[in-house]
Image (spheres, rainbow, N blue to C red):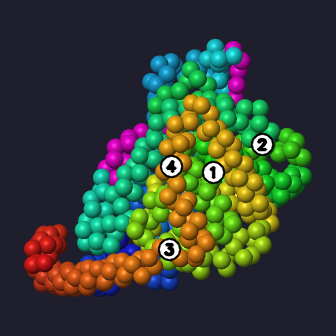
């Protein structure tokens, strides 16, 4: 797949690209005219689609990693769909009856044999819950979510392979170490396995329902407590229009600008007030209740993936966004360093200047014309030179923000999410500061203030003078780092040249003598490469 779709073109090293191209030339792999006409980003999306449901989930997650992928590839992977064929209804019935230890007719007055929907992790059936099985003694229209049989072993098998590939890639290309590919796979595995435990989804749903109890903006369906198991649960069936069904929403008399603003408000409330947000807010998981078109209400489905931040990261995030909105690049650079997004020895002024160059042209537009997606992509692309790495806890939030903004702009091109967010962010930070001054948190407040005192003093100093203390020394350290990197790059280029030669030799040996297996030659070549004198 990697060779057939020419995905090696994304490798950062020309020698490795040449080596892979030689191997692809020797081995008969698919490279037809249709593929030749497509971009690398589109070929990458197709490759993930053909690899199956686990790879599709991985591709969807990678689409948010603008620190790992170029904008075109990230955008292509964002369009991956995980609609899958149905598995047999008999299997679903067997899982339901075995899990609840009851026959089907004791649970439901009616059970629909035809599934309503199927994705990579689960399948949905509809039914009518029997009064005897209902907590309130009434009959209810419900959906039954059933996890696909044997999905966990498939996930573990494929992620194990991904871990091996991540380790090999990091060894072959040391520059990839800063991306922590192994950690990326681990985070992905944890996220997908969490989706396979419906008890976690039920807990998330119950918390969202509590957070928005009696809300006029969002409705969260009821999950029936007695009927929650690891691989199946029963939930209230709700109806509404898909949030991206623009024509029918207009026909119903819904104000799309109002609907867009409601969606952004819900997201900002989840993130900054509740610190617990729905992290899979694509159009398939959001309906709109149009019972009262003048006061439409969102309906949240599929709460399997939820996000939260620890208090320190939560505050840092709010301060970063405010600094970005206010175009305070020096402060933004300091917060990126403080938060661990870039190395601690990064030259702050150089980072601030780079941020200003890429962000200023975008932020100089009217607020309603600023799109967060392209801004993030440009930000990450520029900051790669400073070894930027997005922390795992922010990946889900970035994904959610891009979905929310995309949906909002689709409903209302003039959505001003920044104008909505700025007062909410400022207000939340003030409330958070005041809450920290309670007696029970006084000690933590003092410690936190002392910890930030040096940063505050340095920030003031830089603001007043426009430069860091000892700029000559700082520049000298920066030059030393650059010199060291160039030396390492030179050594690494030599290694890659030897590796390319070995790969090419392996391809020739394979064509001349097919009895010598290609994997053996590759392993031998890799061993010789590692034994080469440093």
Few, some or many residues within 10 Å of mark 3 (<14, 14–19, 20+): some
> How far separated are the C-alphas under marks 4 and 2?
40 Å
The residue to which callout 1 is attached is 281
Q: Quadrant of residue 474?
A: bottom left
> How far separated are the C-alphas under marks 4 and 1?
39 Å
- Can you see residue 164? yes
> How far separated are the C-alphas under marks 4 and 3?
21 Å
Nearer to the camera, 243 or 177: 177
The first of marks 4 and 3 along the sequence is 4
Which of the image's four quarters has the N terminus? bottom left
The first of marks 1 and 2 along the sequence is 2
Residue 247, percent from left and from top: 82, 59
Asked if disc 1 and disc 3 are in contact, CB closer than 8 Å, the reply is no
- Can you see residue 47? no
The numbered disc on residue 468 is 3
Asked if disc 4 and disc 2 are in contact, CB closer than 8 Å, the reply is no
Element at label 3: loop
Residue 380, percent from left and from top: 52, 70
> How far separated are the C-alphas under marks 1 and 2?
15 Å
């Amino acid at each position: 797949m990697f060779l057939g779709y020419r995905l090696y073109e994304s490798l950062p090293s020309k020698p490795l690209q040449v080596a892979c191209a030689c191997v692809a030339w020797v081995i008969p792999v698919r490279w037809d005219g249709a593929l030749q006409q497509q971009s690398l980003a589109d070929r990458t999306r197709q490759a993930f689609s053909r690899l199956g449901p686990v790879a599709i989930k991985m591709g969807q997650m990678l689409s948010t990693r603008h620190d790992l992928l170029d904008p075109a590839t990230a955008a292509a992977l964002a369009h991956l769909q995980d609609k899958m064929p149905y598995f047999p209804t008999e299997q679903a019935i067997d899982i339901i009856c075995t899990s609840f230890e009851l026959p089907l007719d004791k649970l439901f007055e009616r059970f629909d044999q035809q599934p309503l929907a199927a994705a990579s992790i689960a399948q949905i059936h509809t039914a009518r819950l029997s009064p005897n099985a209902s907590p309130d003694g009434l009959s209810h229209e419900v959906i039954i979510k059933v996890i696909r049989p044997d999905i966990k072993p498939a996930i573990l098998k494929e992620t194990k392979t991904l871990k091996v590939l991540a380790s090999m890639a990091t060894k072959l290309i040391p520059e990839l170490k800063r991306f922590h590919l192994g950690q990326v796979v681990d985070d992905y595995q944890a996220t997908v396995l969490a989706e396979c435990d419906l008890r976690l989804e039920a807990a998330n749903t119950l918390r969202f329902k509590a957070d928005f109890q009696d809300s006029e903006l969002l409705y969260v369906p009821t999950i029936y407590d007695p009927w929650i198991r690891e691989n199946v649960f029963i939930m209230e069936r709700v109806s509404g229009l898909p949030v991206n069904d623009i024509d029918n929403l207009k026909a119903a008399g819904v104000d799309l600008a109002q609907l867009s603003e409601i969606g952004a408000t819900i997201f900002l409330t989840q993130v900054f007030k509740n610190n617990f947000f729905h992290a899979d807010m694509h159009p398939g998981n959001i309906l709109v209740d149009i019972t009262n078109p003048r006061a439409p209400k969102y309906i949240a489905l599929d709460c399997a993936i939820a996000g939260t931040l620890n208090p320190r990261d939560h505050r840092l995030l709010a301060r970063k966004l405010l600094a970005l909105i206010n175009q305070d690049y020096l402060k933004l650079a300091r917060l990126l360093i403080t938060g661990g997004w870039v190395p601690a020895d990064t030259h702050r002024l150089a980072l601030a200047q780079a941020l200003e160059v890429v962000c200023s042209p975008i932020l100089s537009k009217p607020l309603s014309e600023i799109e967060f997606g392209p801004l993030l992509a440009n930000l990450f692309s520029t900051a790669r030179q400073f070894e930027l790495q997005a922390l795992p806890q922010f990946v889900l939030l970035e994904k959610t923000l891009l979905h929310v903004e995309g949906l909002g702009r689709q409903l209302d091109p003039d959505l001003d999410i920044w104008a909505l967010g700025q007062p909410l962010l400022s207000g939340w930070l003030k409330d958070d500061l005041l809450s920290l001054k309670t007696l029970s948190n006084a000690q933590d407040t003092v410690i936190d203030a002392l910890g930030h005192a040096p940063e505050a003093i340095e920030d003031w100093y830089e603001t007043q003078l426009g430069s860091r203390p000892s700029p000559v020394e700082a520049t000298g350290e920066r030059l030393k780092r650059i010199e060291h990197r160039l030396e390492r790059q030179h050594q690494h280029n030599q290694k890659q040249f030897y590796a390319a030669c070995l790969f090419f030799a392996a391809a020739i040996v394979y064509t001349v003598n097919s009895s010598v297996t290609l994997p053996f030659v590759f392993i031998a070549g890799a061993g010789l490469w590692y034994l080469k004198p440093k």
